[in-house]
Amino acid sequence: MKFKKKDKEAKPNKEKKVPVMKVGTHKKTVIALWLVLIASVSFGVYKNFTAIDMHTVHEKEVIEQHIIDTNRIENFVKDFAKSYYSWSNNKEAIEARTAAINNYLTKALQDLNVDTVRIDIPTNSTVNEVKIWNVEQAGKDEYTVTYSVDQTVTEGEQSSRNTAAYTVTVHVDGDGNMVITKNPTISSMPVKSSYEPKAQETDGTMDAAITEEVTEFLETFFKLYPTATEKELSYYVSGNALAPVSGDYLYSELINPLFTMDGDTVKVSISVKYLDQKTKAAQISQFDLILKKDSNWRIIG
């Protein structure tokens, strides 16, 4: 009996292996990638620290201030004004005036002022006083000066005294030399203010007994104050609250004393009338004092 040969057992299909590229750390490609990564991170860190935040940057402008001695400028303008506003109605005096003011003016202003005082002018002028009212910096080397001139003008037999205000501009160079660059221009002087300080009043915090004590103390003190020595003052005054005056004044009276109690001290606002023995005129001095009582009343401020 013949037996058929059994079919050969089917062999399982072998799985195809996915090709994998193995890259070792020693390969040049890996080294290059690491270098790129390190460079990128380093650059990012650098940019982070050096980035400019436009919203938080604050620029500070430092202005350098120069302190100028305005006394030199004031004296320069005063000397100029004395020459500019003084003349006599004769040729020699007018030529002398022109030569004098040219020492203060630029060439352009010299030409401008040629005919300000003519040879046929009918007046004479003398300057009594020049006052400087204001010196204000108008530029890096420019200063505007406001001043007034008190002058006596004579025409024939008649004389009048006039006061007027003007401004000039003075240029000061690096060596401190000066020249007037703007001609005297009419201006105004300060006038009396309408300000009135609030009148002080006694607030009723002191009783009659203390008021009498303090008044007697003040009368005694101000009688001797004009001639008191420093040692004598030390009995009435603490420290340097009041200094000796050594004046020839005769005490007359206290005027409108105002007292305010403040804890254990008394604030005093008072006018004291004296007779000036030299001029024979009344002299009224005003004092704001602080008094305190230990064994006796003393001026402490």
Image (cartoon, rainbow, N blue to C red):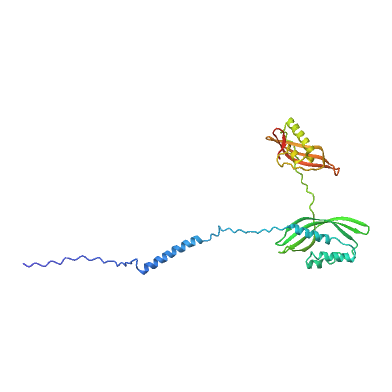
Q: Is residue 130 placed above or below 262 in the rendered structure?
A: below
Spot occupied by residue 184 in the image (x, y as percentages of width and height) = 80, 61
Which residue is at a point 76% across and 55% down the rendered structure image? 134
Instruction: Locate residue 260, reporting x and y percent.
Output: 72, 36
Q: Is residue 34 visible?
A: yes
Image spot of residue 224 (x, y percent): 79, 38
Say left or right for 1 vs 298: left
Q: Which quadrant would residue 270 be assigned to in this image?
A: top right
> In which quadrant is the N terminus drawn?
bottom left
Visible residue check, residue 167 = no
Q: Is residue 64 left or right of residue 246?
A: left
Furthest-bottom residue in this view: 28
Q: Nearer the viewer, residue 28 or 284?
A: 284
Whether residue 26 sits left or right of residue 169 in the image: it is: left
Tell me where residue 129 appears, x and y as whole percent: 83, 55
Q: Residue furthest front?
A: 231
Q: Residue at x 37, y 69 (%)?
A: 29
